[in-house]
Amino acid sequence: MKPLYTFVLAAFLSQVAPMPRAMAQDVPRDAATVSLTEFQWLKRPVVVFADSPADPSFEAQLRQLAEDPAPLVERDVVVITDTDPAVQSELRRKLRPHGFALVIIDKDGEAKLRKPLPWSVREITRAIDKFPIRREELLEKYPAGR
């Protein structure tokens, strides 16, 4: 009887359990449809630029971001892509990338880091964790004897 009870309970919980935050994350947003002001103080945009969606670096970066989205969700990251230089999106005009570029913007709307090559989620999150705003968030979440 116990194995049957465990099976039924597991099946029931899988149906009613909330969706993990990592799965609820937005898919990459197109830079032509967003403005930095909509994310200010709410999200950390990670912008991936390329001159074409077929750029191998662009494909590699999106693949790496999709492999482990949970740490990005935890840090309030929104991924924005821009692969059409002819459109001249607000982000492209402001950040002026040349070919492939990875730009991490903090919640204050300022570009904190630019990279000409794809970065892993681990490298991105380690960089974000060094930002002053992220450090304040961590201190509020985990007050170490304040």
Image: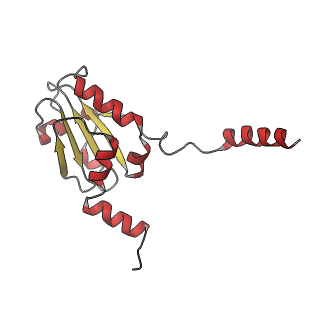
Outermost residue, right direction?
Answer: 1
* In the image: residue 80, left or right of residue 6: left
> Considering only vertical position in the picture, is 63 above or below 72?
above
The image shows residue 24 at horizontal and vertical percentages of 48, 41
* In the image: residue 103, left or right of residue 38: left
Q: Tell me the quarter of the image containing the N terminus.
A: top right
Outermost residue, top direction?
Answer: 54
Whether residue 1 appears in this view of the structure is yes
Question: As rendered, which of 7 and 48 lies closer to the eye?
Answer: 7
Residue occupying the point 73% across, 41% down? 10
The image quarter in which residue 50 lies:
top left
Residue occupying the point 34% across, 54% down? 42
* In the image: residue 23, left or right of residue 66: right
Whether residue 27 appears in this view of the structure is no
* In the image: residue 114, left or right of residue 123: left
Residue occupying the point 39% across, 34% down? 66
Q: Tell me the quarter of the image containing the C terminus.
A: bottom left
The image shows residue 130 at horizontal and vertical percentages of 26, 58
State the scheme by which the image is colored.
secondary structure
Q: How many marks?
A: 0
The image shows residue 139 at horizontal and vertical percentages of 37, 69
Residue occupying the point 17% across, 27% down? 87
Question: As rendered, which of 12 and 31 lies closer to the eye?
Answer: 12
The image shows residue 72 at horizontal and vertical percentages of 38, 46
